[in-house]
Image (cartoon, helix red, strand yellow):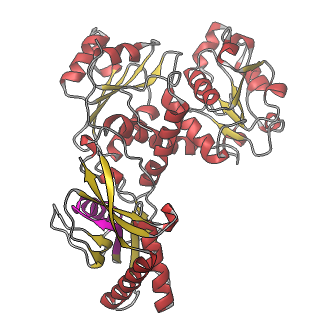
Amino acid sequence: MSQREKVQIMDADGIRRALTRISHEILEKNAGTKDLVLIGIRRRGVPLARRIAEKIKEIEGTSVPMGILDITLYRDDLSQLEYHPLVRKTEVPFSISDQKVVLVDDVLFTGRTVRAAMDALVDLGRPKSIQLAVLIDRGHRELPIRADYIGKNVPTSRREIIDVSLREIDDEDKVIIFEKES
Amino acid sequence: MNFKRKDILGLEDLSPEEITLILDTAEPMKEIMTRDIKKVPTLRGRSVITLFYEPSTRTRTSFELAAKYLGADTGSISVATSSVKKGESLRDTARTVEAMAADTIIIRHSSAGAPHLLARWVSARVINAGDGAHAHPTQALLDMYTIREKKGGFQGLKVAILGDISHSRVARSNIWGLTKMGAQVRVVGPKTLMPPEIEKLGVEVYYNWEEGLQDVDVINVLRIQLERQKKGLFPSIREYTNLYGLDRNKLQVAKPDVLVLHPGPVNRGIEISPEVQDGPHAVINEQVTNGVAVRMALLYLLMSRGEKDEIPA
């Protein structure tokens, strides 16, 4: 199956502004950085969480702990796959118990990744609350999950693919919609 | 890289890429072992049976914990307490285990090749936990994980395997795995404990420690199987200890940052002196930890995938 580039919906400035707004919203909702931690979901949630942490430091002058979550071992579709997703390390070198955890990911789609991430998180401790920040919310939820902070709402059809590029991984910042051609 | 094997029977037929994938996968598994809640749900609803025809405490426990940390259920059959003692054949036992819906069977057997037979008979996945003097792939993989973690890689590394080479499945599996990954492997020990034509596996052979341990990066000390002493393969334990037991003096000729491994259980003061065993070069306890992580990686790679393999015709 091939795919065709349809439209670019965010560029580097757009991503930067969205993350700046999300950072302000996180600070406003949590009244500062007390007991706040950021956890990026591998892979592209990780650089996003790091950027939000930097932005918060710029705004508030305080550092927020940042961790990395690999959810492969918590996926609900492993037994349906014919290949092995590479398991990578979870790196949360601090206690999340009684902390306000903000999960960060690039795209919110079916909600299954977030479900897996929440299961993985509660195996690490008992957070006071879990919030969710995403760069793109594209709809089509299959589970009762919603985001607290959204960079951009993008109504999509299921035939479309949202492709997020981040400079730390892909050398540039952009979000593009592809359409599957059958 | 896709891991498509049904069984893990030895390292001879694994590619360097497959070995690297196993070692890479063991890294995140090791992190799970450091958590307060040492359990992930990945293999929930799957079952692992250990079938041991030889005594073992650490290997069996290591496999059982690895399975449990990944959420699988485990059961065990050991020779001393089972119908095996009542004369049941390996094939019938295998069928029985399979009839209990076991997804993976871990087997240790005194006969070389028993796991390979089992793998042909059952559709469950099979992991060789030691067969005769032939192979012990998971021990070699955990040794390799430990070496890679401490030394950063294998290319050009000088590794000495010291002791009773001829009765050692650990030695053979280490040789297969390490040479495949680019290490220079040598075996060091008395002639009576050296199998004929061992050099055909791509190793150098040394009969004295001064040359054999010269400038090596890693020494893997094998357990002396004391029961063999009755067969007169070496004159006395004291003489063996003098000539081949790893002590501070012999360690001098190796590289200053030499790593000392031992598969356990250790005959303290015989093949390795207490000061070396408890000293800064030895990583024997870390090997045990890494063993669980490597076995978790193997169980994940064999069991998490979807399609169930058929018995080959």
Residue drawn at the location 42% of the way across and 69% of the way down: A174
Left or right, B107 with reference to B86: right
Q: Position of residue A30 (x, y in %)?
A: 33, 87
Left or right, B181 with reference to A126: right
Q: Which one is in front, A139 or B91? A: A139
Q: Which one is in front, A137 or A99? A: A137
Asked if the magenta segment contains residue A111, the reply would be yes
Asked if the magenta segment contains residue B307, the reply would be no
Q: Is A167 situated above or below B209?
A: below
Could one spot residue B232 in this view of the protein?
A: yes
Residue drawn at the location 46% of the way across and 69% of the way down: A47
Q: Which one is in front, B229 or B101? A: B101
Q: Is A17 situated above or below B186?
A: below
Q: Is B12 situated above or below A34?
A: above
Q: Exactly how many numbered labels are in the figure?
A: 0
Q: Which one is in front, A78 or B115? A: A78
The quadrant of the rendering that contains the N terminus of chain A is top left
Q: Position of residue B108 (x, y in %)?
A: 41, 22
- Residue A126 occupies which quadrant of the picture? bottom left
Could one spot residue B222 in this view of the protein?
A: no
Tell me where the magenta segment starts and ends, as one range: A102-125
Q: Position of residue A97 (x, y in %)?
A: 35, 73
Q: Position of residue B167 (x, y in %)?
A: 59, 16
